[in-house]
Image (cartoon, helix red, strand yellow):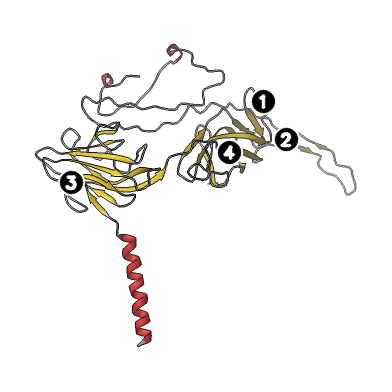
Amino acid sequence: MIASIRKFIVLAIVLLCTLSMFSQEEYLISQGGTITTCSGVLYDSGGADGNYDNNEDYTITIVSEDSETNIRLFFTEFNFESATFDNLSIYDGESIASPSIIAPSGSTNLLGQEIVASGNSITLVMHTDGSVTYPGFAASISCSYSCQDYEIDIVNTDPEITNLDSMWVDICHVESILMVGNAVFPNNDIVYHQSFENLYYIWQFVTEDYEEIYEGEGLFNPEVVLEQSGGYSVHLTTIDSNGCVEHFDDNLRIRTSLRPDFSEIIIDEGICLGEQLVLNGAFIQYTFNVNPVLGNSYPICFEDVVGVWQSTCFTFYSFAKNAIITSPEDIISVCMNMEHSYMGDLDI
């Protein structure tokens, strides 16, 4: 009897733990008003399994339980009719008078996106027209502290930089190089703790057609071996314990030599035991050109909404040596691959 009771208690605990893992507070945008929370899931009016309805106009505000934290929404589901007909708008504050974060969005534009408020509140507005309904959205709610600004740098290498003007480090084939990073935390411990040890480091060594990555928590001084010969641009990215990202893209570059070829060494033939052997050392010297890596290409999507201005910034680095832009005339061309639009839509 005692054994049966123990089994029942263990089973009950397992069931309770399992239920608590999968149960989250659920909110519907149709309930409106203000909710105060740092967890749960926000759905459209149809909930987890249904579609939203026609002719909806709902507004809801989410406020963090801790005034020092920021509200975050991660859209695990987002399926609307085109934004011209059904859409969701998001504002950075407690009302629609707050600055807009997301212009009216439809289709699947916010799927997989995370929206972070600048403060402890965020407001969502959902509008639908009189026909055609879709599954809507699901957004996980969480809170986090604001980022504490910090700076990162690459302060040293071993071997050292060969020429400070060109910022090249020259190493032999498969020779290791020690990278030494540094970070400065001017706002440390105001809200959370930052240190070298709890930063996550991502070291990227990039050629025109090849990339090597070293990454890990506390990896501020990795010893790197680059397998392919050639010229590498070095990029460092860090993520602190609060998920705040910093980039360092200076002009530091690494040149690795080609594998030596000693096939021209000449050895005398026909020697006897005890005779002196003369080795004539020789090698074949190769040269190669190193071209700068002209940035990275990545897609940027704009919401297809009529009459709404949208903008974004592209970061371009790794210009050729002494290439300095002083006026628009210095830019020879800008090449883009545009879809579902025409050039009259774009202003650079």
Residue 51: percent from left, percent from top: 16, 48
Query: Residue flagged by tag 3: what amino acid is it?
Result: Ser
Q: Mark 2 against mark 4, which lies toward the viewer? A: 4
Q: Residue at point 26% right, 22% down?
A: 342
Tell me if label 3 and label 2 are in contact, CB under 8 Å.
no
Question: Which residue occupies the foreground of this view, 7 or 193?
Answer: 193
Label 2 close to label 4 by CB (< 8 Å): no
Which residue lies most toward the front here? 67
Label for residue 163?
A: 1
N-term-proximal mark, 2 vs 4: 4
Q: CA distance from mark 1 to mark 4?
A: 22 Å
Could you give the CA–CA distance between mark 3 and mark 4, rounded to whole angstroms? 58 Å
The label number, if any, that marks residue 228 in the structure image: 4
Q: Amino acid at mark 2?
A: Glu
**Residue, disc 2:** 264
Measure how far apart labels 2 and 4 are at the Cα level: 23 Å
Q: Circle 3 is placed at which residue position?
A: 30
Q: Residue at x 59, y 30 (%)?
A: 253
- Horizontal and vertical percent position of residue 177: 65, 39
Picture layout, residue 331 above or below residue 17: above
Dot 4 falls on a residue whose secondary structure is: loop
Q: Which mark is first along the chain, 2 or 1?
A: 1
Question: Which residue is most to the left?
Answer: 130
Residue type at mark 4? Gln
